[in-house]
Amino acid sequence: MKKINSLSKAAENLEKKAHLIEEHLEEISDRINQIEKRIYDIRDKLSQKEVEVIETSRQIKELEHQLHEVRQKIKKHRKLIQQAETQREYERLVRERDKLVAKSTDLSDKIDSLKKKLKDLLFEEDKLFEEEEKLEKEREKLQKEYSYLLSRLQSILVRLNRKIEGFRELHRF
């Protein structure tokens, strides 16, 4: 009878351990799922940032090309102004040059603004990459812990089965 009580108590303890480990495994699994969702969201944001970076870079190149063309026109107008034969022609060329200078300034400002935006986007991208890396490490750690606990649970279940078999053997006699 003592042997049966001892086996019964041991089996109950193993069942409690198994139940606790199962609960902990479920918690870890939930945390892993949350991390994977956050990683997915980060990767989605990174894809969006990548598109923004490409589009912003394209806009910068386009504006730089326009700025180059405007600066070439300004140089041409400066030469034409020096060669102007009448006061009227001189004034018209000066007005056109002034408009081109204003356009050049506007393009330069837009380029500077886009470069700042690009810098900010790249900074945000870096932060997202860092966060993703941190989450990947955390997920890996949790997966290792999950695997370890799963092997412990399997070990406990094997021991529990042995106790049950021992209990059955005692009941046969």
Image (spheres, rainbow, N blue to C red):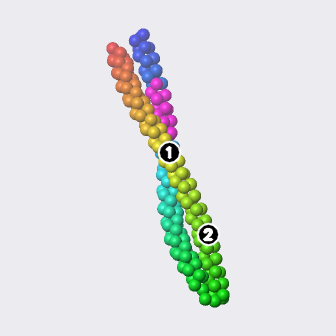
Q: Quadrant of the C terminus?
A: top left
Q: Residues within 10 Å of mark 2 (few under 14, many from 20)?
A: few
Q: In the picture provided, is 95 more to the left or to the right than 124?
A: right
Is residue 41 visible in the rendered structure shown here?
A: no
- Element assignment for label 2: helix
| Furthest residue in direction top, as rendered | 2
Q: Relative to 156, is 111 above or below?
A: below
In the rendering, at what x and y percent does residue 153 appear?
41, 28
Residue depicted at x 61% and y 73%: 101
Decide whether residue 24 is among the magenta residues: yes
Q: Relative to 77, is 140 above or below?
A: above
In the rendering, at what x and y percent does residue 172 appear?
33, 17
Residue depicted at x 44% and y 35%: 141
Q: Main secondary structure of the magenta part?
A: helix
Q: Which residues are magenta?
A: 17-32
Structural distance between the alpha carbons of marks 1 and 2: 37 Å
Kindly report which numbered mark, 1 or 2, lies closer to the viewer in this rendering.
Answer: 2
Residue depicted at x 64% and y 80%: 94
* Residue 138, numbered label: none
Q: Can you identify the residue that label 1 sits on? A: 130
- Element assignment for label 1: helix
Q: Amino acid type of disc 1?
A: Glu
In the rendering, at what x and y percent does residue 117 appear?
57, 58
Camera-side residue: 94 or 165?
Answer: 94
Camera-side residue: 64 or 114?
Answer: 64
Decide whether residue 113 is among the magenta residues: no
Dividing the picture into quadrants, the one containing residue 112 is bottom right
Marks 1/2 in contact by CB < 8 Å: the verdict is no
Q: Amino acid type of disc 2?
A: Thr
Q: Can you identify the residue that label 2 sits on? A: 105
Which of marks 2 and 1 precedes in the sequence?
A: 2
Residue depicted at x 60% and y 76%: 100
